[in-house]
Image (cartoon, helix red, strand yellow):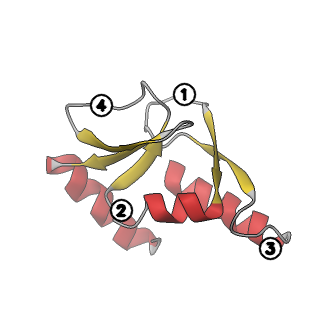
Amino acid sequence: MYRAVNRELQRASEEAGAGPGDQLELICECGEEGCSTTLALTSTEYDEAHTQRDRFVVASGHENPQIERVVARKEQYLIVDKFGEAERVAEAEEGRQGTD
């Protein structure tokens, strides 16, 4: 759900004239109910983080080692890669929503 919201925020920003290097304020994709942490990324950084359907951007400390592993540590966020059942669910959801 958080990724879908972030994609909408990204699209709205681009429609308003933002370029690939402009900062976006996005929602942490940790999936924890009630998480309202925001992350500052450029549109390019956000797209690069999602080169695989099972990758998400989360705030530092929001990673869950039981279902994901950290694949990149950035100053403002982490990129995590889901595995096991969480990976299957993430990929199925992405396919259903038609997002990249």
Say above or below: 90 vs 16: above
Q: Position of residue 20 (x, y in %)?
A: 69, 68
The residue carrying mark 1 is 34
The residue carrying mark 3 is 15
Q: Position of residue 33 (x, y in %)?
A: 47, 30
The residue carrying mark 4 is 64
Of the pair 90 and 79, the residue shown nearer to us = 79
Mark 2 element type: helix
How far apart are the alpha carbons under marks 3 and 1? 28 Å
* First-in-chain label (1 vs 4): 1
Residue 97 picture quarter: bottom left
Query: Badges 3 and 1: C-beta atoms under 8 Å apart?
Result: no
How far apart are the alpha carbons under marks 2 and 3? 25 Å
Q: Residue at x 48, y 41 (%)?
A: 74
The residue mark sitting in front, 2 or 4, is: 4
Mark 4 element type: loop
The residue mark sitting in front, 2 or 3, is: 3
Q: Position of residue 28 (x, y in %)?
A: 54, 39
How far apart are the alpha carbons under marks 2 and 1? 20 Å
Q: Residue at x 23, y 54 (%)?
A: 87
Say above or below: 21 vs 86: below
Please, what is the three-letter code of the amino acid marked with disc 3?
Answer: Glu
Please, what is the three-letter code of the amino acid marked with disc 4?
Answer: Asn
Say above or below: 6 vs 21: above
**Numbered label attached to residue 93:** 2
Please, what is the three-letter code of the amino acid marked with disc 1?
Answer: Gly
How far apart are the alpha carbons under marks 1 and 4? 16 Å
* First-in-chain label (2 vs 1): 1
Residue 11 picture quarter: bottom right
Other-residue count near label 4 (Cα within 10 Å), few / some / many at <14 / 14–19 / ≥20: some
* First-in-chain label (3 vs 4): 3
